[in-house]
Amino acid sequence: MQFCDECGSMMVSVDGEMVCQNEECGATEEQEAGLAEAYASTEEQSSEELIETEEGANFEGKPTATDVVCDECGHQEAWYTIKQTGAADEPPTRFFKCKECGHRWRGYN
């Protein structure tokens, strides 16, 4: 991964040239010979990077938290999943779904 010297944004490989993704910056650099294969530009996340937040996500059968309170109905039990959404040195995020009304929220440690 290469970052722009001008603005710090991530650069992507386009036709043998490294191009800054920040449209306002637009800096370019020549790509070093032989390194074209080392750079892979992707537009999509892989399935293991996606966070389970869509409406139909199945929380049932997941662990249950009893130390939370639903903001919608006041129920004190919710299913939860844990995802690492930040850097490895940051605590994970818990995603909750109320067992009573189905309201979803996230909790930060």
Image (tube, helix red, strand yellow):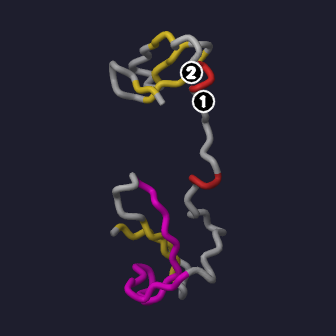
Amino acid type of the residue that numbered disc 1 sits on in the rendered structure: Ala
Secondary-structure class at tag 1: loop
Q: Does the magenta stretch include residue 76?
A: yes
Q: Decide which of 80, 13 is in the foreground and name it.
A: 13
Which label sits on residue 21?
none
Q: Residues within 10 Å of mark 2 (few under 14, many from 20)?
A: many
Q: Mark 1 points at which residue?
A: 40
Residue at image x 62%, y 23%? Answer: 37
Q: Is residue 25 above or below residue 59?
A: above
Which label sits on residue 13?
2
In the image, taking residue 39 as reference, residue 93 lies left or right, namely left
**Residue 54 picture location, percent across and down:** 61, 63
Residue range in magenta is 63-86
In the image, taking residue 98 as reference, residue 67 lies left or right, namely left
Q: How crowded is mark 1: few (under 14 residues within 10 Å), some or many (20 or more)?
A: few
How far apart are the alpha carbons under marks 2 and 1? 7 Å
Which mark sits nearer the N-terminus, 2 or 1? 2
Q: Decide which of 18, 23 is in the foreground and name it.
A: 18
**Residue 102 picture location, percent across and down:** 56, 79
Amino acid type of the residue that numbered disc 2 sits on in the rendered structure: Ser
Secondary-structure class at tag 2: strand
